[in-house]
């Protein structure tokens, strides 16, 4: 059980580290009020003016620091190497 947990954490760290290499900046915004159901109407009803007034106007920019991809990749690799050294109970 511990081996699979540590391997999942290591793989996740590797994936996030690679993503930080590819993404320079991410814009975060709440999109709860922008969701629409299958027929195209807003979940608040038919009044589109009310829904457009409630849409979020604030957005946050997230820019990862320069050291983040390297540290995530290296720590993910160390955790995966640690899982290779663990003994499995089944065998």
Image: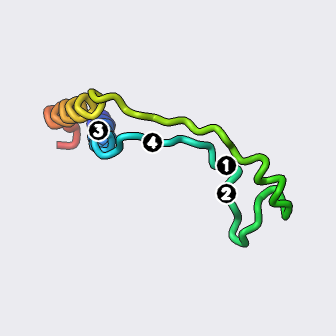
Residue 17, which numbered label? 3
Label 1 vs 4, first from the N-terminus: 4
- Estimate how packed mark 2 is, as few (under 14), some (14 to 19) or many (20 or more) residues with alpha carbons within 10 Å: few
The quadrant of the picture occupied by the N terminus is top left
Q: Which residue is mark 1?
A: 32
| Foreground residue among 58 and 84 | 58
Per the model, the C-alpha gap separating discs 1 and 4 is 18 Å
Per the model, the C-alpha gap separating discs 1 and 2 is 6 Å
Image coords of residue 44 (percent x, y): 81, 56
Q: Judge depth for marks 2 and 4 and give the one in front.
A: 4
| Quarter occupied by residue 67 | top left
Label 1 vs 3, first from the N-terminus: 3
Per the model, the C-alpha gap separating discs 1 and 3 is 28 Å
Total labels: the figure holds 4
Query: What residue is at 27 percent from the left and 34 percent from the top?
Result: 69
Is any part of residue 67 visible from this angle? yes
Labelled pair 1, 2 in contact (Cβ < 8 Å): yes
Image coords of residue 48 (percent x, y): 81, 60
| Foreground residue among 6 and 34 | 34
Image coords of residue 74 (percent x, y): 20, 31
Q: Secondary structure at mark 3?
A: helix
- Estimate how packed mark 1 is, as few (under 14), some (14 to 19) or many (20 or more) residues with alpha carbons within 10 Å: few
Query: What residue is at 30 percent from the left and 46 percent from the top?
Result: 22
- Estimate how packed mark 3 is, as few (under 14), some (14 to 19) or many (20 or more) residues with alpha carbons within 10 Å: many
Q: Secondary structure at mark 2?
A: loop
Labelled pair 2, 4 in contact (Cβ < 8 Å): no
Labelled pair 3, 2 in contact (Cβ < 8 Å): no
Q: Which residue is mark 4?
A: 26
Label 3 vs 2, first from the N-terminus: 3
Per the model, the C-alpha gap separating discs 3 and 2 is 30 Å
């Amino acid at each position: 059980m511990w081996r699979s947990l540590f391997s999942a954490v290591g793989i996740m760290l590797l994936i996030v580290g690679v993503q930080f290499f590819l993404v320079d900046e991410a814009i975060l915004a709440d999109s709860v009020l922008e969701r629409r159901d299958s027929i195209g109407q807003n979940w608040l009803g038919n009044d589109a003016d009310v829904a457009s007034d409630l849409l979020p106007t604030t957005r946050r920019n997230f820019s990862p620091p320069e050291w983040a991809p390297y540290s995530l990749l290296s720590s993910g690799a160390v955790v995966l190497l640690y899982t290779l050294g663990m003994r499995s109970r089944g065998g």
